[in-house]
Image (cartoon, helix red, strand yellow):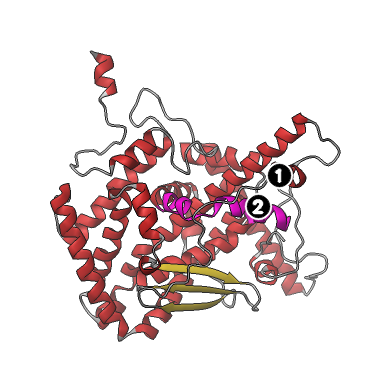
Amino acid sequence: MAKIKRDTKEAIDYGQGRERMNPDLENKLKSQKTTLSKNPAFPDVDKNGVPDNFEELVASKRFKDVVQKVKHYTGMEDISGQNAFSQLQRALMGAVQKVMQIESQNKEYLENLAVDLVIKEMGIPEGAFQFDAKLVGMGGINQDRFQQQGEEPEEEEVEAQFGQEAEEDLEDFMSAMEKFDLEKSKRRFINALIQGSSKKGHYMFELVRNELNRIDPQLLNLYGVLMSINDLIYWMMPDEAVQMMAGNPSAMAGKEEIDDTTDPPTIKVRGLFFPVLIHELVKGVMEVFGTQGLPDDPKSQEMIMGSTDTLPNEIWDLRLGPVIWEKFLQAYPSEIFEDDKKHIQHYLFARFSALDTKKFFEVAKQILSGDPKGEKFLKDMVNDIVSDLKKRDLDDSLGSYDDDDDDGDYDYGSDDYGGDDDDDDDGLDDLLSGLGVSRPK
């Protein structure tokens, strides 16, 4: 009898709510067939409990958070069932029409407000980036850089890029494949963190409540309805249907890209709505620092990103990333959330991303499982960053700062962190050296 009871338990912990995610997503989570499943960063979950794996644990919390947001902004107490979903779809369409009408009269103001908000809340140093943020109409997002499927290199290419030059036997070939797989898993996890942080940007509009109220008192709640229902749709439709919807040019809501040919580099974003613009700006900033997680070699970078940076992968990053990012923020030392220290979060993210795969996954697993060792590791990193910044400020004040000997980069190759030294001078490096980080070539 106990066995039957165990088998009939739901894989997802829905709490007391009646709302349920799409069965297709439940099955993929339970069978670990999501594009994030079995990532080496994910800790084990007690097999005697529910959920049975880390993806289910993350999805359980995220789904409940999304449902709560929808209820908060729509005022609906029960959003379960097809009738409620149809009502939400109508509310979404109504919000879209009203928001576009209001924003059309205030585009430039909202574009500038989005940039100012992100700079302030993320602690971006003055002059670190140029920003090109524009609100566009339906169908105004260029899809050029979106991949539906990953491009897997030939085995010979993997061996050439990731294998040992001196050895060519089967054992070393397998180690080359393993290294490539680990680098891909690392990239996938960093992408989930980036998407998680940017997804949180969906609701940063609450921080400029007064400014939005001056435009139109309806706008704040309309944004809440718009973004919360959009989040819910990712959970209420089958995975393939969401992919088709996201791949439709007319349904594309936002896009970001980094132009490293300008000085300083430009974060270029396009979005249908103000909250989407914020989302893409946050994502762009985080993407710059996340590039520290890639190997130095351009060909290796291309192979990894060609395999991992796809639309189906991004959809699962958007679903699960916010909770993963929350867990990382909870492990950050509290002092780096103070207004005058927020910029340290970027140094920390870059340094963490630059760890070699072995240390990267060890620390990530500690953080996600709540192991105090993970928090201590990040705390030690922050202490080193603060020490480096103080030393650099002292060197600057004494006039002894020499770009040829020390270009401002932190030492990612230290024994403590297990990375490789990197002394690039191209593209984003002028920017990043000013921020205390470097970018792989």
Vertical order, 417 against 56 (above or below): below
Residue at horizontal 33 percent and vertical 69 percent from the top: 205
Q: Which residue is mark 1?
A: 158
Residue at horizontal 70 percent and vertical 71 percent from the top: 430
Q: Is residue 83 left or right of residue 5?
A: left
Q: Quadrant of residue 277?
A: bottom left
Which residue range is magenta in the image?
292-318
| Residue 406, horizontal then vertical, whole percent | 78, 64
Q: Is residue 421 left or right of residue 240?
A: right
The kind of residue tagged 2 is: Met
The kind of residue tagged 1 is: Val
Q: Residues within 10 Å of mark 2 (few under 14, many from 20)?
A: some
Q: Is residue 414 left or right of residue 289?
A: right
What element does badge 1 sit on?
helix
- Is residue 164 magenta-colored? no
Residue 303, label in figure: 2
Q: Residues within 10 Å of mark 1 (few under 14, many from 20)?
A: many
